[in-house]
Image (tube, coloured by chain):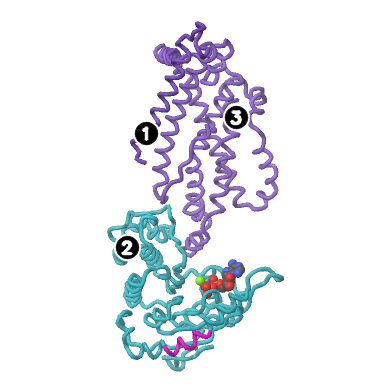
Chain colours: A cyan, B purple
Amino acid sequence: MPQDKPSTVAGEYPAAERSAVELDAVKVAYGDRDTSYVAVARADLTVRRGEFVAVVGPTGCGKSTLLNIAAGLIRPSAGVCRIDGVPLDGLNGAAGYLFQADALMPWKRAIDNVAIGLEIRGVSRSEARERATGWLARVGLRAFTDRYPHQLSGGQRKRVALAQTLILEPKLLLMDEPFGPLDAQTRQLMGELLLGLWSEDRKAVIFITHDLEEAISLSDRVVIMSAGPGATIIGDYPVELERPRDPAEVRHTAAFARLHREIWDHLKSEVVKAYAQEDSR
Amino acid sequence: MNRRTILLLQILVGLGFFVIWHFGTTVPMPNGKPLINPFFFSTPLDVLARTWKDFASGVIWRHLYVTALEMVLAFIIGSVLGIVVGFWFARRALTAAVFDPYVKAANALPRVVLAPIFALWFGLGIWSKVALGVTLVFFVVFFNVYQGVKEVSPTVLANARMLGMNNRQLLRHVYMPSAMSWVFSSLHTSVGFALVGAVVGEYLGSSAGLGYRIAQAEGVFDVTGVFSGMLVLTAFVILVDLMVSAVERRLLVWRPSAPTSTAQG
Ligand SMILES: Nc1ncnc2c1ncn2[C@@H]1O[C@H](COP(=O)(O)OP(=O)(O)O)[C@@H](O)[C@H]1O
Ligand SMILES: [Mg+2]
C-alpha cells in the first residue's frame, strides 16, 4: 500500500478510518471463467479525504474499470473497496461520477438534468430548479438553462454534467477523462473551473486523464498504472506544488517541469508496452 | 437545384397527369371514341364534380367520421397494448425469450386474413375494423418500445443510477422517455397502419366508412365513385400525416433531428 505521506494526526486510526476510498488488493476480470480477461491484476490505492488524486496510464489499462469499482457499478473479482472504511456493497451513494462519454439525459433540458438529482431526493420542483439555476450560473451557463444537450457544445455539456454531479454535494468525486474530447483551451478553462469549485469544499477526487500535464497541474498525487492485461499500479508521485494554484500558470514552473520529466520517463515505457500489445493482438 | 424549381416541376408533373387523363378520356379519336375509355377510367372533371357533390350534400362526412373514429381507436388501443407489452418483454428476459417465436409468427401473418374472423367475432360495426387496426399498430409500437428500452445508452443509465434513481424513477426518467422517442418517431407508420386497418376492414364488409364507399362504387362499376373515394382518402391521409408531423416535431424537440419517415398507408 502506498504510504508516501505521513499521517497528519499522530496516534489516530490509520488510513482505514480516514480514507475516502481504499482499494485493497482489487482484482478485476471480465467475462466468464473460460473467456476471462484480467483487466486489473492488483490495485492498491488509498485516497484520503480532501485529496485530489490523478490516475494516468496507457489506454485500455483499466482506469475506467477502477473508477467503476469505486462507484460500485462493478464488483471486484477479488479484494475489497472500502468507502470511509466500510466495504462497499452495491452502489456508492456518496460518490458523484463524471463519465467519459456523454451521460446527460438527452430528453431533459440543461436545468432539468441538473435538478433531477434533487427532485428524486424529494426536494420540491421549484426549489430544485432554483438551485439548479444557481449551479448552472456557477459553471458559466446561466444563459443556457433551457437548452437540450444536443444544443450545447461538448464543453458546455461537460459543465452541465459537472453541475449535475456537484449539486448533490458528493463526498467523493470520480472523474473519468472528463475533459478528454475537448480542445486544449477549453480543457484549461475547465481545469480552472474544477479547481475553483473543488477548493471551496475539498472533496476527495479521483481524476482520470491521459494527459500527464493536466494530471500534475490539478492534483495532489499522480498515480500511474501499467499497461494491461493484468494492470497494476506502478507509480505514485506526490505533487508538491502550492495551492491555490492556477493550473495554466503552474505549468511554467521549474518544479512542474522536473516532476513532468520524472513521471513521463516512467510512463513512456508503459505506453510503448501498450502499443506493442495492441499490435500483437 | 433550388426548391422553387423542384416545386414547379412537381406541380407540372401533376398537371401533366391530369391533362393527359382529361384529354385522353374526352377528345374523340378519328374512330369517334376517346383514346382512353372513360367507362374504366372516368374523367378528372367527373371525379372532382362527384367529390364536390358528396361534400356539398354532406353524405361523405358520416363516412369520414366513421373511418377517423376507427383509426383513432385502433391507434390508441394498439399503442397502449404495445407500450405495456413492450415494457414487460424488455424488462423480463425470460418472457421475451419464451414468447419470441410466437411474436415473430404473429407478426409474419398477413393481417388481412384476419378481417373475416374479426367480422365474425365483432360484427360488421366499427369494432371489427378497430381490431384489425390494433393488430397492425400493436406490433409497430411493441417493437419500438422494446427497442427503445433495450437501446438506452448504458452511460446514461449508469449516470442516472449514480444520481440515485431507484427502479421506478429509472422507468419514469430514463426508460420511458427513451422508449417513447422510438414510438414517436414511428408515429407515421403506426397511424398509417391504423388507417389501413380501418379502410381494409370497411372494404371487406361494413355499412359505413371510406372503404365502404369505395367498395360500394366498385360493386356497381361506378369508376368515378371509386376514384372520388380514393381522392378523399388520399386527402385525409395527407391531412393526418401533416398533423402527425406537427405532433412529432413538438414531442421530439430534444432530438438533434427527428428522423422523417413517410406514411405506410
Ligand atoms: N465490460 C467489459 N467486458 C470485457 N472487457 C472489458 C469490459 N470493460 C472493459 N474491458 C476491457 O478491460 C480493459 C480496461 O478497460 P478500461 O478500464 O475501460 O480502460 P481505460 O479506461 O484505462 O482505457 C480493456 O482492455 C477493455 O477492453
Ligand atoms: Mg476509460
A101 falls in the magenta region:
no
Rate crowding at label 2 as few (under 14), some (14 to 19) or many (20 or more) other CA atoms within 10 Å: many
> Which residue is tagged 2?
A136
The circle drawn on residue B74 is none
Calculate the distance from the C-alpha at mark 1 to the C-alpha at mark 2.
46 Å
Quarter of the rendering occupied by the C terminus of chain A: bottom right
How far across and how far down the image is residue A221, in percent?
A: 43, 85
CB under 8 Å between callouts 3 and 1? Answer: no
Secondary structure state at the residue bearing disc 3: helix
> Which residue is tagged 3?
B132
Q: Amino acid at mark 3?
A: Leu
Q: Amino acid at mark 2?
A: Leu
Chain on which label 2 sits? A
Calculate the distance from the C-alpha at mark 3 to the C-alpha at mark 1.
37 Å
> Can residue A161 be seen in the rendering of this structure?
yes
Q: Residues in magenta?
A: A261-269
**Sequence-wise first label, 3 or 1:** 1
Q: Residue reaching furthest right? A: A34
Rate crowding at label 1 as few (under 14), some (14 to 19) or many (20 or more) other CA atoms within 10 Å: few
Q: Amino acid at mark 1?
A: Leu
How far across and how far down the image is residue B5, in percent?
A: 35, 35
Q: Residue at x 39, y 57 (%)?
A: A149
Instruction: Label the magenta part by its dominant secondary structure.
Output: helix
Rate crowding at label 3 as few (under 14), some (14 to 19) or many (20 or more) other CA atoms within 10 Å: many
Say if labels 2 and 3 share a chain: no
> Can residue B58 be seen in the rendering of this structure?
no
Say if labels 1 and 2 share a chain: no
Chain on which label 3 sits? B
Closer to viewer: mark 2 or mark 3: 3
> Which residue is tagged 1?
B7
